[in-house]
Amino acid sequence: MLPKIHPDPSSTLPAVSAEADWFAHLQRVAAERGDALALTGPSGSWSYSALMHRIDQIAAWLRDRLPAGDEPVGVMVAHDVDVVLLPLALTRLGRVWTNLDPFAPPARIADIAELSGMTACIVDEAHREMVEELGLPIATIVAAVPDDAPVDPSLLVPERSGQDPLFLVFTSGSTGRPKGVVQTHLQHLNEVHVSVEQWAPGPDDRILLVFPMAFVLGPVTVEAALLTGASLHVHDARTHTPRATIDVIRRERITVLYSSPHLLDAITAELRPDEQLDGLRAALTGGEGITGRQVDAFRAHAPQATFVNGLGSSEAGATAQQIVPPGTPVDPGAMPAGRAVPNRELRIVGDDGEPVATGEVGQLMVVSDSISGGYWRNEEETAKKFGALPDGRRTYLLGDLARLDAQGVLTLQGRSDTAIKVRGYLVDISEIEDALRSNEKVSETVVIPVVVEGAPTRLIAYVAQHSRVRSDSVADLRRRLREKLPEYMVPGSIVLLSALPRNERGKIDRLNLPQPDDAPQDVDDTAWTQHELVVGGIWASVLGLDKVPLDGDFLALGGDSLSVEEMLADVGERFGLELASTDLLGAPTLRAFAEHVRRGSAATKRHPDVVHLRSGAEDRRVFCFAGAGALALQFLPLARRLDGFDVTAFQAHGLERRALPDWTVEAHAHRALEHIRAVQPHGPYRLLGHSFGGLVAFEIAHRLRAEGEEVALLGLIDTFLPDTATNELAVTGQFGRLAQRQPRGVLERLQHVIAPVSESSLQNTSPLRAFVRLARARTAGLIRYRGQQQFDTFFYQSVLAGRRYRAQPYAGRAVVVAARENGIDVDSWQPLLTGRATMVRVDGEHSALMREPHVAQLSATLLPALKDRLEQVLPA
């Protein structure tokens, strides 16, 4: 438990009894706090006494405009002070209210209005049209209460008991139509009681309201502040950037941050490594699970703060909390649910409703008189989840599987409604999600079972990864899962997303998850040839699959550059062949590749350094140049999004087949330009280069313009600009000291951006190891290494070549794209790009922006520039 920060917490601790009246307690606190700050937001601030006066003004103004009766009233306003003031005024009038979230889909808003039976909706001017367009049979009242509106001293506050409805919240409806959950006076006074007992809000606190009021934790945050004498600071995190939220935390001197794990992650990602939130004394999360890894990442910026993670629901209210004092170590996996909060008894029951033995897994039941009043006007659904014990105490089944140990510590074991049969085995979906989250690169994930009558159950995993690290490919994720889970629990499809879709409450929106591109296929290998069986086995092993369909595409099944090289090496070793990535491009499916192997790779010789990625119109050619130590295949995800363009990519000479490499940018450019002029004798040319490849593209663009050719576009994708400082670098021993000062020049800058994503990085290595790696770079192209070592060797070789390059001013059309995470300084290119130049930042880190899902933003940035010259010459 946190130490209390106010002298006598019992003075603001609400009575939790059947006669409890929520508004009466607010009146008592306001009388005590007087001129102390109560509520502030973008449009105004109020002391406690001014707050109560404003509530009286609004209540008197609304009384004359609301339809008669006691039907619920809707509220739809921006997330500003009115989102708090209007519900308080309705409570003052004794009217039940429900918040209509403007971020929700119109169909959901209409459902809530119908199910609640509301007769009126109070809106601000910005949302009047939204409500009126729904065509609901309700009165729409624009909240325009004058600052000098009169109060009515005769307007009494209706007496309310603990079990009377206070407001309604509606379940997310992610799997069906929403249900209205009755929130009672008693339930929410108990929420305040829990807050005071667990993390001690009080008069010295400044609490940030970021949860929407349509989500139960919005009102919980309001009452945790206003019913304990703290100040409430309203901020709309959904319409502002994480950086803006950080600025509010600092400017408003926030002491308590209560947010979803998703928002906490966004704030953590935005904070610089040395940036601290010194004023926070407590950080709370709720609404979904969180891992110790997420907690530690945030605590690095607020080590003085106590962390509190809560388990609860709209129906049960706060149920359990895990409190982590400053400095307390946490396991990196899923945070435990913790212990029961005050006025809650937790029971673990079996299917028969009877308690199971201590430590056994069963369904989690909450026993308390201060839980929800049930589902609004839905007795059938209420009877399914709510009940009563023989002694009269009320119960609610949360739907979670859990166990309680002898010390009363609750551990969740998944959801009772997520245990499904897969190939005859009972599988808990949460176990798969936990296995995915154990990968430190994964930021969020959800696994969806697809059950179709007459077909095997199919598992689809949706995964978002942290943008500051090199993301894993689908094949990498599968292989990691197979190290932790039995084969039948590994999802057949893994979909990579930049972020999981979320509903207006910040919860994962399962109905808006995209369908995977790979449809399920039954694999019958009884009629396969020997080559198909052997190659298919290698593909399956590398991709982390049980079996690969005969017409399955290696890259579409999750392969990336490293898995391509691993597969080619294994197949080549098995059949005594020398294979390159161009062999896979020409035969991308298992059927075609097995036949290619059967005939021998010599039957279809291809250029060792050039890969044709996409066919298109001859006047729409795009030439791409891979980064240091990267395959030309690096551009395949981008090429797939360049509809109508003919895309060819270049990689370093000697990367896949033994050959003397090019040791200068000029030599790289000369070799590539010979091929380009043979394919396309004259412009306009379109050139794209990633990282070191951008220097090659830059040099080629200079040469073409010097020869009088038109370069329609030069695209530099996260390319570091070399400078004269690199001439001073000593080759021997220099790499071992790079971490001791800021990077200078292309050699160090390229190394600096790759370091977080390459296990063979130059930083944090001994001088001896650095020397060995540098020596290996001198063998590039002559000695062929296996897997990542080959890429690393050419990476070092390329940055050594890049440090010698001296860029000259360029007057042509150019686009510079920088990775938002750990990317280049786009302004460094400004002095050299003297023509029409565009500077853009996109999500992702240096290499991740070339892959799904970040490549979607990259292509959206480049396509208009690629089409620019075409739009000038093509007829309208």
Image (cartoon, rainbow, N blue to C red):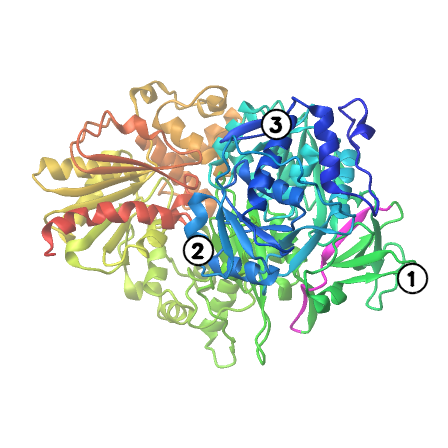
Amino acid at dot 2: Glu
| Mark pair 1, 2: CA separation | 49 Å
> Is 416 in the magenta?
yes
> Magenta stretch?
408-423
> Is 259 in the magenta?
no
Work out whether residue 327 or residue 224 is closer to the camera in this orientation and state it: 224
Work out whether residue 56 or residue 656 is closer to the camera in this orientation and state it: 56
The tally of labels here is 3
Q: Which residue is mark 3?
A: 50
| Mark pair 3, 1: CA separation | 47 Å
> How many residues crowd mark 2 within 10 Å: few (<14), some (14–19), many (20+)?
some
Q: Which residue is mark 1?
A: 390
- Report which quarter residue 170 is drawn in: bottom right
Q: Earlier in the sequence, mark 3 or mark 2?
A: 3
Relative to 533, residue 632 above or below? above
Q: Which residue is mark 2?
A: 132
SS class of the residue under badge 2? helix
Relative to 759, residue 601 above or below? below
| Mark pair 3, 2: CA separation | 33 Å
Q: Earlier in the sequence, mark 3 or mark 1?
A: 3
